[in-house]
């Protein structure tokens, strides 16, 4: 495994791999502090590509002024061990100065898909993501890029960016990896106190309970599903809801509150952002609502 820190070295390493005829390039962009979620992306990349490139870059552009850019957890040695174990061929770890040597005057911005959910509570976040991912795509020129559905809105936004701008890369979405008790893995889980960690289970539990209630026909409309979602989360006294929404996926359009979820006509997303103290956690579930068996 090669570790490279400059764009020039990255291009040279890729050229070497290409000349060796190592097949398609699979790319896994991350912010580091790697866990099993990132590992699953590396494994998916390994299955589809001859060369696996991972980037580790905490991108200042996608953090708001009051967010955790400075304190975002970092552990390069541990990350490199995981990357090597999971089959990365090249790890790209640029500095902020390498990626942004001068104030950036050019950005990539996807409209409409970025105004709701995390886009509403984190203004500018997705512009930072689409801009840095465009830069990384230009540097790495991957055939495939692997992203987790943990950040489902990010997947929707990046797919749209790639389609709108004819970028020559296929975005591959990978399932959410969870702890055994249901908590979605996140680098930010280390911020949680023991009690917050316990109560954070309410995110995955609320999503599961709504899915079950829909299947049982106990909940039918969009409003009923949303109310159940909120009421389950409210059982955890430390949980402060940022959003709990049900939208179409991947277009992220609103659904009529009084209409049956099964009338959505395709995939929907139940998406949550919940704060525990200063830690904001997200989780979601993308599915195709069907008529409950009892109603068919
Ligand atoms: P991050 O380092 O948080 O920017 O995440 C890098 C990539 O890993 C993104 O595509 C995330 O969606 C993905 N990822 C993070 N957590 C998980 C998880 N629990 N399961 C699957 N993918 C994840």
Image (spheres, rainbow, N blue to C red):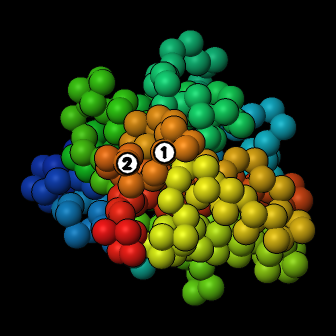
Residue at far left of view: 21
- Say the numbered circle drawn on residue 263: 2
Asked if 270 appears above or below 162 in the picture, the reply is below
Asked if 97 appears above or below 153 in the picture, the reply is above
Residue at far bottom of view: 180
Q: In which quarter of the image is the N terminus?
A: bottom left
Secondary element at image label 1: loop
Q: Which residue is drawn at 64% across and 69% down?
A: 206
Secondary element at image label 2: helix
* Crowd band around label 2 with a 10 angstrom C-alpha radius: few (<14), some (14–19), many (20+): some
Q: How far apart are marks 2 and 1 (CA)?
A: 7 Å
Of residues 252 and 222, the one nearer the viewer is 222
Image coordinates for residue 164, horizontal then vertical, percent: 30, 24
Can residue 193 be seen from the camera position used here?
Answer: yes
**CB atoms at circles 2 and 1 under 8 Å apart?**
yes
- Quarter-of-image position of residue 158: top left
Image coordinates for residue 183, horizontal then vertical, percent: 63, 75
Q: Residue at x 45, y 52 (%)?
A: 261
Q: Residue at x 43, y 43 (%)?
A: 248
Left or right for 21, reference 208: left
Residue at far front of view: 295
Left or right for 183, reference 178: right
Left or right for 110, reference 105: left
Of residues 84 and 270, the one nearer the viewer is 270
Image coordinates for residue 86, horizontal then vertical, percent: 39, 75
Residue on which the image places disc 1: 259
- Quarter-of-image position of residue 161: top left
Asked if 5 appears above or below 185 in the picture, the reply is above
């Amino acid at each position: 495994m090669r570790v490279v820190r400059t764009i020039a070295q990255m291009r040279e390493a890729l050229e070497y791999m290409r000349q060796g005829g190592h097949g398609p390039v699979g790319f896994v962009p991350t912010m580091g502090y790697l866990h099993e979620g990132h590992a699953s992306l590396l494994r998916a990349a390994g299955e589809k590509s001859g060369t696996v490139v991972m980037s580790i870059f905490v991108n200042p552009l996608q953090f708001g002024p009051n967010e955790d850019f400075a304190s975002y957890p970092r552990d390069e040695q541990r990350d490199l061990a995981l990357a090597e174990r999971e089959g990365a061929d090249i790890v790209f770890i640029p500095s902020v100065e390498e990626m942004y040597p001068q104030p950036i005057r050019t950005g990539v911005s996807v409209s409409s898909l970025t105004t709701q959910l995390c886009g509403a509570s984190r203004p500018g976040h997705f512009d930072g993501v689409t801009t840095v991912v465009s830069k990384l795509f230009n540097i790495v020129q991957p055939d495939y890029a692997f992203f987790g559905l943990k950040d489902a809105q990010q997947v929707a936004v990046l797919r749209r960016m790639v389609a709108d701008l004819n970028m020559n890369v296929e975005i591959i979405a990978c399932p959410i990896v969870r702890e055994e008790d249901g908590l979605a893995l996140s680098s930010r889980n280390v911020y949680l106190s023991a009690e917050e960690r316990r109560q954070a289970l309410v995110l995955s539990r609320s999503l599961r309970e709504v899915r079950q209630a829909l299947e049982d026909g106990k909940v039918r409309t969009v409003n009923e599903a949303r109310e159940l979602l909120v009421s389950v989360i409210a059982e955890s006294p430390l949980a402060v809801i940022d959003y709990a929404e049900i939208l179409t996926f991947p277009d992220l359009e609103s659904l009529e509150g009084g209409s049956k979820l099964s009338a959505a006509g395709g995939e929907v997303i139940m998406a949550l952002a919940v704060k525990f103290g200063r830690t904001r956690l997200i989780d979601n579930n993308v599915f195709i609502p069907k008529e409950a068996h009892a109603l068919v």
